[in-house]
Image: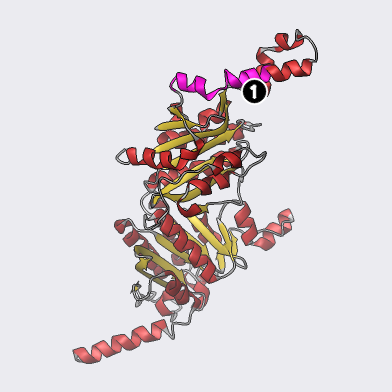
Amino acid sequence: MDLKDRTESIRSLRASIEGTNESAARKRISLLFDEGTFVEIGAFVKQRPTELGVVDAAAEGVVTGYGAVNGVLVFAFSQDISVLKGAVSEMNAEKICNIAEMARKAHAPLVCMLDSCGVRLHEGIDALAGYGKIIAKLNSMAGETVLVSAVFGTCAGALSFIPAMADYSVMTENAELFLSSPDVVKARFGSDKAGTAQNAYENGTVSAICTSDTDAVDKIKEFISFTCDVYVTEDDINRLTPEIADIISKDGYDIREVISSVADDGKSLELNPGYASNIVTSLINIDCSPVGVVANNGALTSAAAEKAAGFIAFCDNCSIPVLTLVDTDGFECDSKENILNSSLLVTAYMNAEVPKVTIIVGKAYGAGYISMCSKQTGADIVYAYPCAEIAALPAETGAVFMCAQEIIQTEGDPVDGRNAVIEKYRNTIASPLEAAKRGHVDDIIDIETTRQLIASSFGMLADK
């Protein structure tokens, strides 16, 4: 067979593997990558013969390769449910591990598109070992490669570890994600949510429930654009933010409005919003550079601390600076487990080597002040708004504790006396000026200059 014949033979074989390019797996690949940039790797891989012979499986049931996503180098694998129900085999796993290793060497994101019924049973332990190899490989890449996952169909058994391990995960609304069968969980615990997208959203496994494959891929692209420094904007870096004063003056305000105010074009991508909503973890851009934001949206809990700690570690791994917005009375802890989990937040901040800027927006009391990236626990620079309150105890508690006798001896209505003492506590002991006098706050800033100062501070810290 001459070169021409061999070339035609290979082309014919490739065409038969790719079929008509109508499989869901290949469509998802086409949606993800910039047109004409995808290069498939391992298209001709086949399982080795077993006692049961060789099963014909196009591309061994998984499409692997690399290309550009909005101009950024990205690697991906897409499980093909149309080929033996996407079942994982020994060589299927080898293909996934190979593309993962290529992503690691290139320090490029890896996108895992999950849609599989489980292991290829006739391969026995070899297929099961493939499961283990995939999980081990992806786990070994933590901190070196951004890992993104999307569940489009069924993601069962050990494969369910992948969305939980990923830096960012999404799921289509009708997809399934479970370690144990939902039927078993329902029988034992009476839960109808087991395995559903809603359950995965509420327990923090996925960050978004998507209406379609296209929606899921768009979310992946958005995440990549926020983390890979490809954002372009005409938003003025010197834009003032007077609206923040109006936002924080409202009772029960939403910290997300403050985050949008300082972000380029008001755009942010919140991670795991369905879990521990009393803390917000978001990606934004400031002057076209990615910034991770950790912000209080209520009292701290162990779940909030755990969520924020994971996000801070992700930012540190990706060299993304961290902005912390503080407004909390402190922790709600009622057990040893809660205290242990809560300590993760301090540890994450102190271990992170990226630039860290903190703004005390409102209250910063007790363990909440210490845990939310104070000067003592990792902040490179700390700002405070004029309305900030910084103390060991909330004003209502601290003032009464310190001045109980003074309140008792107040002439007239003791309620008025109590209120006067609380106000005095806020204006003296809890004043940001007192913290600034002792060097715990670097500056008390005008609220309207927030965006400017964030940009300036991270610029100053860029070579940290």
Dot 1 alpha-carbon crowd within 10 angstroms: few under 14, some 14 to 19, many 20 or more: many
Q: Is residue 54 visible?
A: no
Dominant SS of magenta comes to helix
> What is the count of numbered marks?
1
Q: Is residue 293 visible?
A: yes
Image quarter in which the C terminus is found: top left
Indicate left or right for 110 with 152 as reference: left
- Kind of residue at badge 1: Ala
Say which residue appears at 75% left-offset and 10% top-offset. Answer: 410
Residue at which label 1 appears: 395
Say which residue appears at 44% left-offset and 79% top-offset. Answer: 57
Q: Which residues are magenta?
A: 421-439
Indicate left or right for 196 with 164 as reference: right
Q: Nearer the viewer, residue 398 or 420?
A: 420
Q: Nearer the viewer, residue 420 or 330?
A: 420
In the rendered structure, does residue 410 fall within the stretch colored magenta? Answer: no
